[in-house]
Image: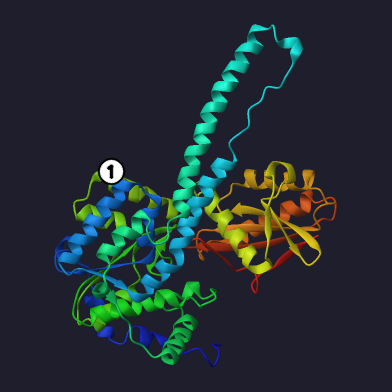
Amino acid sequence: MASDAFDIFNASKIYPNPEHIFGTHQISLSQIKDNCIFILDTNALLVPYSTGAGSLTEIGKIYALLKSKNQLLIPDQVAREFANNRPKKIGEMFDAINKKRNGIPNLSIGQYPLMEGMEGYTEALGIELEMKDILKRYHASIGKIVNEVKNWSWDDPVSLIYREIFTPEIVIKLEFDKDQIKKNLAYRYLHKIPPGYKDSSKDDDGIGDYLIWLAILQVGRSKKNVVFVSGEEKPDWYHKSDKTALFPRFELITEFNDLSEGHHFQIIRLSDLLKIMGADSGAIEQVKEEEISIRHTGFSGYASTAEIAVRNFYLHKYGDVVLVDEMRYQVDFEYLDGDRKIGVIISNIETSMRRLEKTIRNLFAHIDTSIYDECDFVIVGESHDNNFEILVERAESMIYRFNHNAFEVNVKYGYLDYGTFVEISDGRKQIKLF
Protein backbone atom coordinates (compact mmCIF):
# COMPACT_ATOMS: atom_id res chain seq x y z
CA MET A 1 0.00 0.00 0.00
CA ALA A 2 1.25 3.53 -0.77
CA SER A 3 2.70 5.61 2.05
CA ASP A 4 0.63 8.40 3.59
CA ALA A 5 2.81 10.99 1.81
CA PHE A 6 2.16 9.46 -1.60
CA ASP A 7 -0.77 11.02 -3.45
CA ILE A 8 -2.63 8.16 -5.11
CA PHE A 9 -4.47 10.76 -7.21
CA ASN A 10 -1.26 12.36 -8.53
CA ALA A 11 -2.23 11.54 -12.13
CA SER A 12 -4.98 14.16 -11.77
CA LYS A 13 -2.32 16.78 -11.05
CA ILE A 14 -0.10 15.62 -13.90
CA TYR A 15 -3.00 15.58 -16.36
CA PRO A 16 -5.57 18.09 -15.02
CA ASN A 17 -7.29 18.31 -18.41
CA PRO A 18 -7.70 14.70 -19.61
CA GLU A 19 -10.07 15.84 -22.33
CA HIS A 20 -7.05 17.41 -24.08
CA ILE A 21 -4.87 14.27 -24.01
CA PHE A 22 -6.09 12.73 -27.26
CA GLY A 23 -5.89 16.05 -29.04
CA THR A 24 -2.25 16.60 -28.08
CA HIS A 25 0.09 16.55 -31.06
CA GLN A 26 3.48 17.80 -32.15
CA ILE A 27 4.05 19.90 -35.24
CA SER A 28 7.30 19.93 -37.19
CA LEU A 29 10.13 22.25 -36.26
CA SER A 30 10.02 23.81 -39.73
CA GLN A 31 6.48 25.03 -38.99
CA ILE A 32 7.45 26.98 -35.87
CA LYS A 33 11.15 27.86 -36.34
CA ASP A 34 10.43 31.37 -37.64
CA ASN A 35 8.22 32.46 -34.73
CA CYS A 36 9.17 30.28 -31.75
CA ILE A 37 11.44 31.13 -28.84
CA PHE A 38 14.69 29.14 -28.64
CA ILE A 39 15.76 28.60 -25.02
CA LEU A 40 19.33 27.42 -24.40
CA ASP A 41 20.37 24.80 -21.85
CA THR A 42 23.64 24.90 -19.90
CA ASN A 43 25.26 22.01 -21.73
CA ALA A 44 24.56 23.69 -25.09
CA LEU A 45 26.54 26.71 -23.86
CA LEU A 46 29.42 24.44 -22.80
CA VAL A 47 29.66 22.45 -26.06
CA PRO A 48 31.87 25.05 -27.87
CA TYR A 49 34.64 24.48 -25.30
CA SER A 50 35.15 21.05 -26.89
CA THR A 51 34.83 22.00 -30.57
CA GLY A 52 36.90 24.05 -33.01
CA ALA A 53 37.12 27.80 -33.59
CA GLY A 54 35.09 27.47 -36.80
CA SER A 55 32.21 25.87 -34.93
CA LEU A 56 32.30 28.61 -32.30
CA THR A 57 32.09 31.27 -35.01
CA GLU A 58 29.07 29.56 -36.61
CA ILE A 59 27.34 29.15 -33.24
CA GLY A 60 27.94 32.83 -32.49
CA LYS A 61 26.43 33.87 -35.85
CA ILE A 62 23.30 31.76 -35.26
CA TYR A 63 22.80 33.08 -31.73
CA ALA A 64 23.28 36.68 -32.92
CA LEU A 65 20.73 36.17 -35.71
CA LEU A 66 18.14 34.69 -33.33
CA LYS A 67 18.73 37.51 -30.87
CA SER A 68 18.14 40.10 -33.59
CA LYS A 69 14.77 38.43 -34.30
CA ASN A 70 13.85 38.32 -30.58
CA GLN A 71 13.87 34.52 -30.67
CA LEU A 72 16.63 33.75 -28.15
CA LEU A 73 16.37 33.46 -24.36
CA ILE A 74 18.41 31.95 -21.52
CA PRO A 75 16.96 30.97 -18.11
CA ASP A 76 18.71 32.67 -15.20
CA GLN A 77 19.46 29.20 -13.79
CA VAL A 78 21.34 28.33 -16.99
CA ALA A 79 23.45 31.49 -16.63
CA ARG A 80 24.31 30.49 -13.05
CA GLU A 81 25.16 26.92 -14.04
CA PHE A 82 27.36 28.20 -16.87
CA ALA A 83 29.24 30.42 -14.39
CA ASN A 84 29.83 27.38 -12.17
CA ASN A 85 30.84 24.97 -14.93
CA ARG A 86 32.88 27.18 -17.26
CA PRO A 87 35.98 27.03 -14.99
CA LYS A 88 35.73 23.23 -14.96
CA LYS A 89 35.73 23.06 -18.76
CA ILE A 90 38.76 25.34 -18.94
CA GLY A 91 40.38 23.33 -16.13
CA GLU A 92 39.92 20.14 -18.14
CA MET A 93 41.68 21.73 -21.13
CA PHE A 94 44.45 23.07 -18.91
CA ASP A 95 45.02 19.71 -17.20
CA ALA A 96 45.07 17.84 -20.51
CA ILE A 97 47.57 20.26 -22.08
CA ASN A 98 49.73 20.43 -18.98
CA LYS A 99 49.79 16.64 -18.76
CA LYS A 100 51.05 16.54 -22.36
CA ARG A 101 53.82 18.98 -21.48
CA ASN A 102 54.85 17.06 -18.38
CA GLY A 103 54.75 13.78 -20.29
CA ILE A 104 57.35 14.79 -22.89
CA PRO A 105 60.15 12.18 -22.62
CA ASN A 106 63.76 13.01 -21.87
CA LEU A 107 65.67 11.14 -24.57
CA SER A 108 69.06 9.69 -23.78
CA ILE A 109 70.67 6.64 -25.31
CA GLY A 110 73.43 6.88 -22.70
CA GLN A 111 77.21 7.19 -22.85
CA TYR A 112 79.00 4.00 -23.95
CA PRO A 113 82.64 4.74 -24.92
CA LEU A 114 83.12 1.27 -26.37
CA MET A 115 80.42 2.00 -28.95
CA GLU A 116 81.80 5.34 -30.13
CA GLY A 117 83.27 3.85 -33.27
CA MET A 118 80.05 2.13 -34.28
CA GLU A 119 78.16 3.74 -37.16
CA GLY A 120 74.74 3.03 -35.64
CA TYR A 121 75.71 4.52 -32.26
CA THR A 122 77.01 7.74 -33.85
CA GLU A 123 73.90 7.98 -36.02
CA ALA A 124 71.60 7.45 -33.00
CA LEU A 125 73.38 10.21 -31.03
CA GLY A 126 72.89 12.61 -33.95
CA ILE A 127 69.19 11.80 -34.23
CA GLU A 128 68.88 12.13 -30.45
CA LEU A 129 70.25 15.68 -30.59
CA GLU A 130 67.80 16.60 -33.37
CA MET A 131 64.87 15.10 -31.47
CA LYS A 132 65.88 16.84 -28.24
CA ASP A 133 65.86 20.16 -30.08
CA ILE A 134 62.41 19.43 -31.56
CA LEU A 135 61.06 18.29 -28.18
CA LYS A 136 62.51 21.40 -26.53
CA ARG A 137 60.68 23.64 -29.00
CA TYR A 138 57.53 21.52 -28.63
CA HIS A 139 57.73 21.87 -24.84
CA ALA A 140 58.14 25.65 -25.18
CA SER A 141 55.14 25.90 -27.53
CA ILE A 142 52.92 23.96 -25.13
CA GLY A 143 54.22 26.21 -22.36
CA LYS A 144 52.95 29.26 -24.28
CA ILE A 145 49.52 27.63 -24.57
CA VAL A 146 49.49 26.80 -20.85
CA ASN A 147 50.42 30.36 -19.91
CA GLU A 148 47.77 31.83 -22.21
CA VAL A 149 45.06 29.58 -20.74
CA LYS A 150 46.22 30.52 -17.23
CA ASN A 151 45.71 34.18 -18.10
CA TRP A 152 42.08 33.66 -19.14
CA SER A 153 39.67 35.14 -16.65
CA TRP A 154 36.48 35.82 -18.59
CA ASP A 155 38.39 36.47 -21.79
CA ASP A 156 38.44 33.00 -23.33
CA PRO A 157 37.13 32.84 -26.95
CA VAL A 158 33.74 31.39 -25.95
CA SER A 159 33.09 33.97 -23.22
CA LEU A 160 34.07 36.85 -25.53
CA ILE A 161 31.40 35.84 -28.05
CA TYR A 162 28.80 35.21 -25.35
CA ARG A 163 29.50 38.64 -23.83
CA GLU A 164 28.34 40.33 -27.03
CA ILE A 165 25.22 38.22 -27.47
CA PHE A 166 23.90 37.31 -24.03
CA THR A 167 22.99 40.77 -22.80
CA PRO A 168 20.66 41.20 -19.78
CA GLU A 169 17.42 41.47 -21.76
CA ILE A 170 17.61 37.88 -23.03
CA VAL A 171 18.01 36.33 -19.56
CA ILE A 172 14.70 35.04 -18.15
CA LYS A 173 14.37 36.35 -14.60
CA LEU A 174 12.34 33.82 -12.66
CA GLU A 175 10.36 35.13 -9.71
CA PHE A 176 9.32 32.49 -7.19
CA ASP A 177 8.58 31.68 -3.58
CA LYS A 178 11.43 29.50 -2.28
CA ASP A 179 9.30 27.61 0.24
CA GLN A 180 6.67 26.85 -2.38
CA ILE A 181 9.35 25.69 -4.82
CA LYS A 182 10.76 23.28 -2.21
CA LYS A 183 7.27 21.93 -1.53
CA ASN A 184 6.52 21.49 -5.23
CA LEU A 185 9.90 19.88 -5.84
CA ALA A 186 9.40 17.36 -3.03
CA TYR A 187 5.99 16.42 -4.45
CA ARG A 188 7.33 16.02 -7.98
CA TYR A 189 10.27 13.89 -6.84
CA LEU A 190 8.08 11.64 -4.69
CA HIS A 191 5.78 11.03 -7.65
CA LYS A 192 8.58 10.99 -10.26
CA ILE A 193 7.19 13.91 -12.23
CA PRO A 194 9.72 15.26 -14.75
CA PRO A 195 11.95 17.10 -15.04
CA GLY A 196 14.79 16.76 -12.54
CA TYR A 197 13.67 13.94 -10.27
CA LYS A 198 16.51 11.70 -11.46
CA ASP A 199 18.96 14.31 -10.11
CA SER A 200 17.49 14.18 -6.60
CA SER A 201 20.72 12.71 -5.16
CA LYS A 202 22.64 15.94 -5.87
CA ASP A 203 23.57 18.27 -3.02
CA ASP A 204 20.97 20.80 -4.24
CA ASP A 205 18.34 18.06 -4.71
CA GLY A 206 18.65 18.57 -8.46
CA ILE A 207 16.61 21.76 -8.41
CA GLY A 208 18.38 23.16 -11.49
CA ASP A 209 16.34 21.36 -14.13
CA TYR A 210 13.09 22.23 -12.35
CA LEU A 211 14.00 25.94 -12.27
CA ILE A 212 14.85 25.78 -15.97
CA TRP A 213 11.48 24.14 -16.62
CA LEU A 214 9.69 26.88 -14.68
CA ALA A 215 11.45 29.46 -16.87
CA ILE A 216 10.25 27.60 -19.98
CA LEU A 217 6.69 27.58 -18.62
CA GLN A 218 6.97 31.30 -17.85
CA VAL A 219 7.72 31.95 -21.53
CA GLY A 220 4.91 29.57 -22.53
CA ARG A 221 2.40 31.62 -20.55
CA SER A 222 2.99 34.45 -23.02
CA LYS A 223 1.46 32.12 -25.63
CA LYS A 224 4.68 31.30 -27.46
CA ASN A 225 5.95 28.07 -28.98
CA VAL A 226 9.21 27.08 -27.26
CA VAL A 227 12.12 25.00 -28.54
CA PHE A 228 14.56 23.94 -25.83
CA VAL A 229 18.12 23.56 -27.19
CA SER A 230 20.23 21.07 -25.25
CA GLY A 231 23.63 19.50 -25.83
CA GLU A 232 22.55 16.20 -24.30
CA GLU A 233 19.53 13.94 -24.05
CA LYS A 234 18.48 14.57 -20.47
CA PRO A 235 17.28 11.27 -18.95
CA ASP A 236 14.02 12.50 -17.46
CA TRP A 237 13.11 14.93 -20.24
CA TYR A 238 12.79 12.21 -22.89
CA HIS A 239 11.00 8.93 -23.43
CA LYS A 240 13.82 6.51 -24.24
CA SER A 241 14.22 3.06 -25.72
CA ASP A 242 17.52 1.19 -25.48
CA LYS A 243 19.36 4.43 -24.55
CA THR A 244 17.91 6.20 -27.60
CA ALA A 245 15.88 9.37 -27.02
CA LEU A 246 12.56 9.11 -28.84
CA PHE A 247 10.60 12.27 -27.99
CA PRO A 248 9.98 14.64 -25.04
CA ARG A 249 8.13 13.25 -22.03
CA PHE A 250 4.38 13.46 -22.49
CA GLU A 251 4.03 15.02 -19.03
CA LEU A 252 6.17 17.97 -20.19
CA ILE A 253 4.30 18.41 -23.45
CA THR A 254 0.88 18.43 -21.78
CA GLU A 255 1.97 20.71 -18.91
CA PHE A 256 3.35 23.23 -21.39
CA ASN A 257 0.36 22.84 -23.69
CA ASP A 258 -2.10 23.55 -20.86
CA LEU A 259 -0.25 26.60 -19.53
CA SER A 260 0.42 28.09 -22.98
CA GLU A 261 -3.17 27.53 -24.14
CA GLY A 262 -2.34 25.12 -26.92
CA HIS A 263 1.18 26.12 -27.95
CA HIS A 264 3.96 23.64 -28.60
CA PHE A 265 7.11 22.55 -26.77
CA GLN A 266 10.00 20.74 -28.44
CA ILE A 267 13.53 19.71 -27.51
CA ILE A 268 16.33 19.65 -30.06
CA ARG A 269 20.09 19.24 -30.00
CA LEU A 270 22.42 22.15 -30.69
CA SER A 271 23.51 20.46 -33.94
CA ASP A 272 19.84 20.40 -35.04
CA LEU A 273 19.57 24.14 -34.40
CA LEU A 274 22.69 24.79 -36.49
CA LYS A 275 21.30 22.64 -39.30
CA ILE A 276 17.89 24.32 -39.53
CA MET A 277 19.58 27.74 -39.40
CA GLY A 278 21.87 26.86 -42.32
CA ALA A 279 25.21 26.70 -40.50
CA ASP A 280 28.37 25.37 -42.14
CA SER A 281 28.27 21.57 -42.48
CA GLY A 282 31.72 21.19 -40.92
CA ALA A 283 30.60 23.05 -37.81
CA ILE A 284 27.46 20.93 -37.59
CA GLU A 285 29.52 17.73 -37.73
CA GLN A 286 31.92 18.94 -35.03
CA VAL A 287 29.06 19.79 -32.70
CA LYS A 288 27.31 16.51 -33.49
CA GLU A 289 30.48 14.57 -32.62
CA GLU A 290 30.68 16.35 -29.27
CA GLU A 291 27.02 15.59 -28.57
CA ILE A 292 27.62 11.92 -29.36
CA SER A 293 30.58 11.88 -26.98
CA ILE A 294 28.32 13.35 -24.28
CA ARG A 295 25.60 10.75 -24.88
CA HIS A 296 27.80 7.71 -25.43
CA THR A 297 30.83 8.44 -23.35
CA GLY A 298 33.31 5.65 -23.94
CA PHE A 299 36.19 5.86 -21.47
CA SER A 300 38.61 6.77 -24.24
CA GLY A 301 36.45 9.81 -24.97
CA TYR A 302 36.26 11.16 -21.47
CA ALA A 303 38.82 9.36 -19.35
CA SER A 304 40.55 12.61 -18.47
CA THR A 305 37.21 14.26 -17.62
CA ALA A 306 36.21 11.36 -15.36
CA GLU A 307 39.62 11.26 -13.69
CA ILE A 308 39.62 15.02 -13.07
CA ALA A 309 36.04 14.93 -11.77
CA VAL A 310 36.68 12.05 -9.36
CA ARG A 311 39.96 13.60 -8.25
CA ASN A 312 38.21 16.91 -7.52
CA PHE A 313 35.52 15.01 -5.60
CA TYR A 314 38.17 13.42 -3.37
CA LEU A 315 40.07 16.69 -3.09
CA HIS A 316 36.94 18.39 -1.77
CA LYS A 317 36.19 15.50 0.59
CA TYR A 318 39.64 14.64 1.95
CA GLY A 319 42.02 17.48 1.09
CA ASP A 320 45.25 16.68 -0.75
CA VAL A 321 45.32 13.92 -3.33
CA VAL A 322 48.49 12.74 -5.05
CA LEU A 323 48.83 11.56 -8.64
CA VAL A 324 51.02 8.48 -8.93
CA ASP A 325 52.59 6.39 -11.67
CA GLU A 326 49.66 4.17 -12.70
CA MET A 327 51.89 1.57 -14.35
CA ARG A 328 53.93 1.19 -11.18
CA TYR A 329 51.29 1.41 -8.47
CA GLN A 330 48.13 0.21 -10.32
CA VAL A 331 46.07 3.17 -9.02
CA ASP A 332 45.11 6.52 -10.58
CA PHE A 333 45.81 8.58 -7.46
CA GLU A 334 46.07 8.25 -3.70
CA TYR A 335 44.84 10.14 -0.64
CA LEU A 336 45.07 10.05 3.14
CA ASP A 337 42.09 9.33 5.39
CA GLY A 338 43.53 9.93 8.84
CA ASP A 339 46.68 7.82 8.94
CA ARG A 340 45.48 5.40 6.26
CA LYS A 341 46.82 5.71 2.70
CA ILE A 342 44.18 4.75 0.15
CA GLY A 343 44.63 4.20 -3.58
CA VAL A 344 41.87 5.06 -6.06
CA ILE A 345 41.12 3.26 -9.32
CA ILE A 346 38.62 4.74 -11.80
CA SER A 347 36.58 2.55 -14.15
CA ASN A 348 33.99 3.50 -16.77
CA ILE A 349 30.46 2.05 -16.67
CA GLU A 350 30.93 0.99 -20.32
CA THR A 351 34.15 -0.92 -19.59
CA SER A 352 34.16 -4.35 -21.20
CA MET A 353 34.25 -7.38 -18.92
CA ARG A 354 37.65 -8.34 -20.32
CA ARG A 355 39.11 -4.93 -19.49
CA LEU A 356 37.46 -4.92 -16.06
CA GLU A 357 38.90 -8.34 -15.29
CA LYS A 358 42.36 -7.25 -16.44
CA THR A 359 42.22 -4.12 -14.25
CA ILE A 360 41.19 -6.07 -11.15
CA ARG A 361 43.67 -8.90 -11.78
CA ASN A 362 46.52 -6.40 -12.19
CA LEU A 363 45.44 -4.59 -9.04
CA PHE A 364 45.83 -7.65 -6.84
CA ALA A 365 48.88 -8.97 -8.69
CA HIS A 366 50.93 -5.80 -8.37
CA ILE A 367 49.57 -3.46 -5.70
CA ASP A 368 51.99 -2.91 -2.83
CA THR A 369 50.07 -3.59 0.38
CA SER A 370 52.97 -2.14 2.35
CA ILE A 371 52.12 1.24 0.77
CA TYR A 372 48.32 1.14 0.67
CA ASP A 373 45.99 0.20 3.49
CA GLU A 374 43.00 -0.15 1.18
CA CYS A 375 41.70 0.82 -2.25
CA ASP A 376 38.61 2.61 -3.62
CA PHE A 377 37.31 1.18 -6.90
CA VAL A 378 35.20 3.98 -8.43
CA ILE A 379 32.78 3.21 -11.27
CA VAL A 380 31.83 6.31 -13.29
CA GLY A 381 28.65 6.42 -15.37
CA GLU A 382 27.41 8.97 -17.88
CA SER A 383 24.07 9.52 -16.15
CA HIS A 384 21.96 8.68 -13.12
CA ASP A 385 20.11 6.16 -15.32
CA ASN A 386 23.04 3.79 -15.82
CA ASN A 387 22.60 0.24 -14.54
CA PHE A 388 25.36 0.36 -11.95
CA GLU A 389 24.17 -2.79 -10.18
CA ILE A 390 25.29 -5.11 -12.99
CA LEU A 391 28.85 -3.78 -13.17
CA VAL A 392 29.12 -3.57 -9.37
CA GLU A 393 28.06 -7.21 -9.02
CA ARG A 394 30.56 -8.32 -11.67
CA ALA A 395 33.32 -6.27 -10.09
CA GLU A 396 32.44 -7.80 -6.71
CA SER A 397 32.66 -11.31 -8.15
CA MET A 398 36.06 -10.63 -9.74
CA ILE A 399 37.42 -9.02 -6.59
CA TYR A 400 36.47 -12.09 -4.57
CA ARG A 401 38.12 -14.28 -7.20
CA PHE A 402 41.45 -12.47 -7.41
CA ASN A 403 41.81 -11.03 -3.89
CA HIS A 404 44.02 -13.65 -2.27
CA ASN A 405 45.65 -11.30 0.26
CA ALA A 406 42.50 -10.14 2.12
CA PHE A 407 43.12 -6.60 0.81
CA GLU A 408 40.27 -4.18 1.54
CA VAL A 409 38.49 -2.72 -1.49
CA ASN A 410 35.60 -0.22 -1.36
CA VAL A 411 33.41 -0.21 -4.46
CA LYS A 412 31.86 3.21 -5.11
CA TYR A 413 29.88 4.53 -8.03
CA GLY A 414 28.35 7.69 -9.43
CA TYR A 415 27.97 9.73 -12.60
CA LEU A 416 29.28 12.89 -14.25
CA ASP A 417 27.13 16.01 -14.26
CA TYR A 418 28.70 18.83 -16.31
CA GLY A 419 32.13 17.52 -15.34
CA THR A 420 31.28 17.07 -11.65
CA PHE A 421 31.29 13.59 -10.09
CA VAL A 422 28.06 12.86 -8.19
CA GLU A 423 28.41 9.84 -5.90
CA ILE A 424 25.29 7.72 -5.46
CA SER A 425 26.79 4.66 -3.76
CA ASP A 426 26.62 6.24 -0.30
CA GLY A 427 23.17 5.73 1.18
CA ARG A 428 22.25 3.20 -1.51
CA LYS A 429 24.68 0.33 -1.74
CA GLN A 430 28.11 0.77 -0.27
CA ILE A 431 30.02 -2.45 -0.84
CA LYS A 432 33.14 -3.35 1.10
CA LEU A 433 34.94 -6.47 0.02
CA PHE A 434 37.58 -8.29 2.00
Indicate the quadrant where residue 219 lies: bottom left
Viewer-proximal residue, 39 or 171? Answer: 171
Total marks shown come to 1
Please state if 81 lies on the left or on the right of 284 as rendered: right
Residue occupying image coordinates x 69% and y 44%: 325
Q: Measured from the top left, where is residue 342 in percent x and y?
A: 75, 58
Judging by the rendered image, the residue that carries numbered circle 1 is: 282
Judged left or right of residue 335, residue 220 is left
Q: Quadrant of the C terminus?
A: bottom right
- Look at the numbered disc 1 and give the secondary structure of its residue: helix
Is residue 161 visible in the rendered image? The answer is: yes
Give the class, few, some or many, for how many residues have Cα within 10 Å of label 1's Cα (few <14, many ≥20). Answer: few
- In the displayed structure, 69 sits above or below 3; it is above
- Quarter occupied by the N terminus: bottom right
Q: Residue at x 69, y 61 (%)?
A: 411
Residue 386 at what x, y percent from top left?
Answer: 53, 61
Q: Tell me the kind of residue under disc 1.
A: Gly
Q: Is residue 303 left or right of residue 9?
A: right
Where in the figure is residue 376, as x and y percent of width and height? 71, 59
Q: Residue 323: x percent and y percent?
A: 67, 51
Residue in view at x 45 percent, y 84 percent: 185
User: Is 79 located above or below residue 280 in the figure?
Assistant: below
**Residue depicted at 45% across the width and 92% down the height:** 179
Q: Is residue 28 visible?
A: no
Q: How is the image coloured?
A: rainbow
Q: Is 110 or 177 nearer to us in this picture? A: 110
Q: Is residue 21 above or below residue 244?
A: below
Residue sitting nearer the eye, 93 or 33: 93
The image quadrant of residue 155 is bottom left
